[in-house]
Amino acid sequence: MSTRTVAPVGMKPVDSGAVHIRGAAKSFGAKDVLVDFDLDIAPGEFVALLGASGSGKSTLLKILCELETVDHGIVRVPSARSVVFQEPRLVPSMQVWKNVVLGRSRALASRAAAEAALAEVGLASHADDWPRTLSGGEAQRVALARALIREPRLLLLDEPFAALDALTRIRMHALVAQLCARHNPSVLLVTHDIDEAILLADRVAVLRSGHKSLDAVVDLPRPRTRGGPAFEALRRTLLAEIGVSTDPEAEPAVADQTQPPRAAPLPVRARSASTVVPRTVVPRTVVPKETERR
Ligand SMILES: Nc1ncnc2c1ncn2[C@@H]1O[C@H](COP(=O)(O)OP(=O)(O)OP(=O)(O)O)[C@@H](O)[C@H]1O
């Protein structure tokens, strides 16, 4: 696919909550990270973004929160947006409630507002605690409260559950689903966890070679649980699309032996041209990270 050259217009705020990205390109030196990348997120829609390590997921998220700029392309995002990172990034010298209202104007930074936000994430009794006394899951719930108290039109989640244990992660999935249903922001979740993407998202996009190579509607009823033929079929499709293989030297296009030649219909409605090349996949759902830069 050739790079579409669009005048670098930078960020344009939109009020609806929608995200609109067209022809986004980003390079670091000779490395082309995003090449003619398109993505739309409708107001209130939850989109998960998957991709191999180093494919550019975090770069895209940074572009959406203006920590990076595009070289070319159109990027429109709501100005009211919040980000939750893998690490909670709480200020250790501030009590929990002050962390929740950090950066807000004096009029909006009341203790009552912080307590209400903490109650939503099940931490009403922790307002006076210090960050160092919290568990990893509690600290991440404070980060969620801090993000949501701003009533963002766009919530950006950069692997927010990756550092949590499996049980806490399951609880966080349920909490995030509940909070998103209540606050209804548009959401972009960057994750390595394919199950997490299927459990939470309305759509799952795959970033590969700088492009959006797959954009699939997750057509499964909520609340969702792991397992079942439709869930497994979608998981295999996503694994194959990301290109996960146990052996980097392996033939690039080997049929997936775990999948029958013609599987039952997938819970996928492709939104754009999808080039799913069958390849060797492994029955695990977390895309391994090769590097840890954070
Ligand atoms: N500031 C930077 N300067 C130079 N190269 C960068 C910079 N930021 C990212 N990169 C490179 O861009 C590529 C994409 O990085 P990015 O962090 O966006 O990938 P990712 O898909 O989020 O990876 P991971 O899943 O491992 O977190 C990588 O090759 C990375 O080394």
Image (cartoon, grey):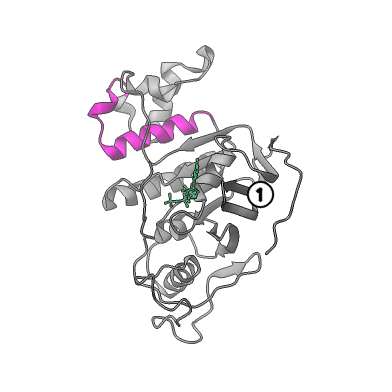
Which contiguous range is marked in magenta?
127-150
Q: Position of residue 83 (x, y in %)?
A: 49, 36
Question: How packed is label 1: few (under 14 Cα within 10 Å), some, or many (20 or more)?
Answer: many
- Image-quadrant location for residue 114: top left
Question: Residue placed farthest to the front in the image?
Answer: 30
Relative to 35, residue 136 above or below: above
Q: The N terminus is located in which quarter? A: bottom right
Q: Is residue 263 left or right of residue 136?
A: right
Instruction: Give the residue at mark 1.
Output: 24
Q: Is 84 placed left or right of 214 in the picture?
A: left
Q: Position of residue 71 (x, y in %)?
A: 66, 43
Q: Please, which residue is most extreme toward the top here?
A: 106
Residue lying farthest to the left in this orientation: 133
Magenta-highlighted stretch: main secondary structure?
A: helix
Which quadrant of the structure image shows residue 199?
bottom left
Q: Hey, which quadrant is residue 37 in on the image? A: bottom right
Residue at the far bottom in the pictured view: 261
Q: Is residue 216 above or below residue 57?
A: below
Q: Residue at x 66, y 49 (%)?
A: 24
Total numbered badges shown on the rendered structure: 1
Dot 1: element: strand
Specify the quadrant that holds the C terminus.
top left
At 46% from the left and 57% from the top, the residue drawn is 197
Q: Amino acid at mark 1?
A: Ala
Q: Would residue 208 be seen by someone viewing this image from the given angle?
A: yes
Query: In the image, is residue 59 part of the stretch drawn in magenta?
Result: no
Taking the spot 41% from the left edge, 77% from the top edge, the residue there is 280
